[in-house]
């Protein structure tokens, strides 16, 4: 009850200051003692527990050089065949394009001639 009624203003300033200095010094001393004790402590030796013992098995080979080389050669062979086929298709398309252009030119020329004749006939009838 006495402490609950006490106020900090009632204590002299020097007493409060030295109280906090003492508390800070006790914290520093406790930290130093804890550090010294921790530096002398040695960690426990690590012991491996091999129960059950580790089993070592030979793994299947994950890389087969001969198989990889054969797949590589097969891929290149197929790509060369595809390249030749694509080139052949391009040549066919170019030939067909030229012939289509010639045919269209002939048709347009025939249409122009027909239109000219029709126009001439229409002028004569007027």
Image (cartoon, rainbow, N blue to C red):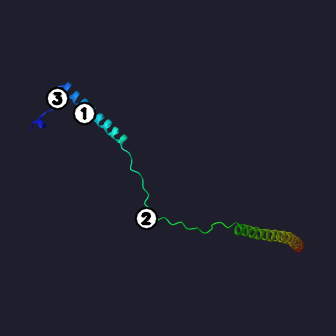
Name the quarter where the N terminus is drawn: top left
Q: Give the crowd class for mark 2: few <14, some 14-19, many >=20 residues within 10 Å.
A: few
Provide residue 123's location: percent of width, then percent of height: 88, 71
The numbered disc on residue 23 is 1
Q: Secondary structure at mark 1?
A: helix
Q: In the figure, is residue 23 to the left or right of 5?
A: right
Counting residues from the N terminus, which is met first, the one under dot 3 or under dot 2? 3
Residue at screen point 35% across, 42% down? 38
The numbered disc on residue 35 is none
The numbered disc on residue 9 is 3
Q: In the figure, is residue 11 to the left or right of 24?
A: left
Q: Secondary structure at mark 2?
A: loop
Q: CA distance from mark 3 to mark 2?
A: 69 Å
Regarding residue 47, the answer to whether it shows in the image is yes
Provide residue 122's location: percent of width, then percent of height: 87, 73
**Residue at the extreme left of the image, as rendered:** 1
Q: Relative to residue 7, is residue 51 depicted above or below?
A: below
- Residue matched to label 2: 51
Q: CA distance from mark 1 to mark 2?
A: 53 Å
Q: Give the crowd class for mark 1: few <14, some 14-19, many >=20 residues within 10 Å.
A: few
Counting residues from the N terminus, which is met first, the one under dot 1 or under dot 2? 1
Counting residues from the N terminus, which is met first, the one under dot 3 or under dot 1? 3
Please tell me in which quadrant of the rendered image residue 24 appears. top left
Provide residue 28's location: percent of width, then percent of height: 30, 34
Residue at screen point 51% across, 66% down? 55
Q: In the figure, is residue 123 to the left or right of 45?
A: right
Q: Secondary structure at mark 3?
A: helix
Depth-wise, is mark 3 or mark 2 nearer the camera? Answer: 2
Q: Give the crowd class for mark 3: few <14, some 14-19, many >=20 residues within 10 Å.
A: few
């Amino acid at each position: 009850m006495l402490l609950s009624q006490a106020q900090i203003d009632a204590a002299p300033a020097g007493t409060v200051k030295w109280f906090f200095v003492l508390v800070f010094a006790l914290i520093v001393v406790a930290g130093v003692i804890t550090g010294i004790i921790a530096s002398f402590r040695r960690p426990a030796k690590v012991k491996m527990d091999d129960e059950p013992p580790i089993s070592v098995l030979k793994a299947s080979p994950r890389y087969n050089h001969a198989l990889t080389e054969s797949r590589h050669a097969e891929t290149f062979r197929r790509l060369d065949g595809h390249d030749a086929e694509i080139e052949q298709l391009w040549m066919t398309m170019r030939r067909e394009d030229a012939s289509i252009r010639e045919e269209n030119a002939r048709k347009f020329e025939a249409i122009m001639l027909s239109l000219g004749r029709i126009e001439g006939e229409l002028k004569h009838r007027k």
